[in-house]
Amino acid sequence: MQRILEEELMTCVEQARAYARADFAAPHSAFIKLFQERFGEHLPGPCVLDLGCGPGDITFRFARAYPHCMVFGVDGSAAMLAEAQRALSAIPDLAGRIVFIPGTLPTLELPLPQYDVIISNSLLHHLPDPQVLWETIKCCAAPGAAVFVIDLLRPATSEEARRITQLYSHNEPEILQRDFYHSLCAAFELCEIEEQLTTAGIAGFTVKQVSDRHVMIAGHLR
């Protein structure tokens, strides 16, 4: 199946609300577990950049897993950031360690010039030009930064994409099921991601399928 682009930003309030209320506990817990398996308990430094943070669930989970870090979550959707801020207001113990910032790649205005850790979940497939993500990471990463990206993998056929959509989102609202299917169709194959890293001049990263629908891209940026 050829890649089919989808909307770069989820700007609709209904979309953001559905995404914020959906049950992503399993994949988001797996995100943290895979990060810890890859990089261990000690970060290269305290400053973490979460690109495409959405409503903030992974941002919160990461801040809890690494209690000495400061996490800066970035998203281009005002609706998503409104959900993130609403959720953060109910977690006072994290309020001083998380900052949400509006911004789109590649024209980000960030409070710090470099970050010790850069994470991203399900942003890559939203980008018409995937190199935008890798070039942004290169610009924002401190020397030796830990980079950890999880994204969807594109199924071989539209039928397989529909099967995966039904399997994992049948209990979710129709709008989320629709967006999930479109995201699967917009995702990349392993070989395409490897080519992206080569084009970006990023070497030594692990590119590995970690579930029936997810890929992990991880390494230290030298």
Image: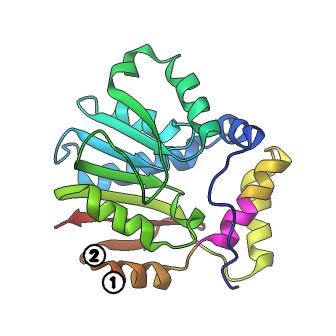
- Residue annotated with mark 2: 202
**In which quarter of the view is residue 2 placed?**
bottom right
Q: Give x and y (percent) for residue 86.
A: 58, 23
User: Which residue is pictured at 73% across the width and 37% down the height?
Assistant: 13
Q: What residue range appears in magenta?
A: 180-187
Q: Give x and y (percent) for residue 202.
A: 27, 75
Instruction: Judge from the rendering whether residue 218 lies leftward or rightward of residue 75; answer left or right.
Output: left
Which quadrant is the C terminus positioned in? bottom left
Q: Is disc 2 in contact with disc 1, using a CB cutoff of under 8 Å?
A: yes
Query: Residue 174, relative to residue 207: is it above or below?
Result: above
Mark 1 element type: helix
Dominant SS type (magenta): helix
Neighbour class for label 2 at 10 Å: few (<14), some, many (≥20)?
A: some
Mark 2 element type: loop
Q: Give x and y (percent) for residue 198.
A: 33, 84
User: Which residue is pictured at 71% across the width and 35% down the height?
Assistant: 17
Instruction: Judge from the rendering whether residue 109 lies leftward or rightward of residue 172; answer left or right.
Output: left
- Residue annotated with mark 1: 198
Under mark 2, the amino acid is Ile
Under mark 1, the amino acid is Thr
Number of marks drawn: 2
